[in-house]
Amino acid sequence: MDSKAEAVVKAAGKSTKAAKKSDFDYDLVVIGSGPSGQRAAIQAAKIGKRAAVVERSRAVGGVCVNTGTIPSKTFREAVLHLSGFRERGIYGSSYRVKQDISIDDLLYRVQQVVRSEIDVIRNQMTRNRVELIESTARFVDPHTIELQSATGHGRRQITADKIVIACGTEAARDSHIPFDGQRIFTSDDVLGLEFLPRSLIVVGAGVIGVEYATMFAALGVRVTIIDKRPVLLPFLDHEISAALTYVVQQSNVTMRLGEEVAEIHMLEGVSKPVEVRLKSGKVLHAEAALYSIGRVGATARLDIDKAGVQKDDRERIPVNAHFQSNVEHIYAVGDVIGFPSLASTSYEQGRAASRHAFGLRDEHEGGIGLFPYGIYTVPEISTIGKNEDELTAAGIPYEIGKANYREISRGQIIGDRTGMLKIIFSPDDKKLLGVHIMGEGASELIHIGQTLMAHNGTIDYFADAVFNFPTLAECYKTAALDGLNRLAI
């Protein structure tokens, strides 16, 4: 073929591609602007694709920014500062920065941070040429989405070649419970509270329930935790779970583990109007109750059945290793697909889904690899890798090394005498298998262990490394030396 003929063929090819491109309004439409949705849209825009994010009005940033991760962790920081909790190890249990803490004091900081986060997200989308459409969305067919403005007036339809569902989750609710958002509320309602209760019953001791239970306890609220499981956060390393249980009990939290709720009622004319009846026959009363029995996918309003997308009994969307739903061009990422339901992994899921959708190399085939958990209880917990129970069940030999904050100079300086860091390693080659931390800075410290594990490092590195003094990072050296001593014969 001569050069002139080749030019004609190339021109025809470009024309065909252009025509195909114009078949849809967008190359990618993302439903939801949380971490996974943001990253999916921005990744597509960076490779020249026409990308749009659809989000409900006044909900930019999704659950993460508006009712979940960002506000709850900011709420925690406000609690720890105003209550003086961090300094109590030095100045005594009665120490407080502010004596009369109101809900407005706590939410003031939250509202500031949320507004700033939303501004950052809007700026990122604008800078990356991602169109933000503030409307509700529902599927009309596999490639068509109907949009409705916040006012309820004006509907229009848009089409997309690829679609990513990143709508997140919402708190699970029981239709038999009289939720009012004030006396009986879910974690999604915390930012709308109008008063700080003096007593609180927390139904459900999952991560969110225990996080809020310990926050309110730090404020001096009398908290009761109810959960049908016999152990607090049983997926944790057993020593960390036991240590957390001890600290929580020292904070005057009553734990009703191994118990199930039968009924919740509102009473009139009493100081503690919330009545919780347990199946065991016990009856509990408090000023308020936080109902925290998990979360369900926020897919009910999307009409995903019209696109042929399947979901499970908790409204979540099953996906394959590439984050594709059962409909090939429709992906789902973030909390709506279930485990691990972390903002950190959601970012990577969104990016991976977008890359796969447009034929780029999938960096996360088979799922996200090694990642840490951050649990923002009081005290903070973070973990990565295997725990003792998992290794025992798998028949893998291991040894441990521990460091207690009270033995570290920095721990004494900050007044954290209950913190601990535990490493688990192979006695054969001394490779690091897991790290488990409870205490101040746990979610930051965990990344040191993560880095070593990602590079198949051994605990000899920690034993030989020079750490700044005084720092909590020294715990790694102390734990490594403790572990090596256990190997000595």
Image (cartoon, rainbow, N blue to C red):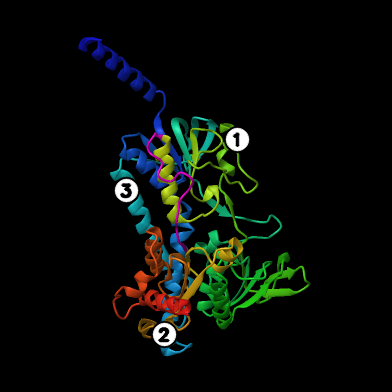
Q: Quadrant of residue 303?
A: top right
In the image, what residue occupies the spot 39% across and 34% down? 358
| Disc 3: which residue | 124
The image shows residue 16, relative to residue 91, as above or below, that is above
| Disc 1: which residue | 305
- In space, the residues marked 3 and 2 are separated at their CA atoms by 44 Å
Q: Between tags 3 and 2, which lies in front?
A: 2
Q: From which residue to which does the magenta span run?
A: 358-373
The image shows residue 372, relative to residue 123, as above or below, that is below
The amino acid at mark 1 is: Asp
In what element is the residue under mark 2?
helix
Badge 2: residue crowd in 10 Å (few <14, some 14–19, many ≥20):
some
Q: Measured from the top left, where is residue 228 in percent x and y? A: 69, 66
| Disc 2: which residue | 407
Q: Between tags 1 and 2, which lies in front?
A: 2
Q: Measured from the top left, where is residue 238 in percent x and y? A: 57, 72
In the image, what residue occupies the spot 41% across and 27% down? 24
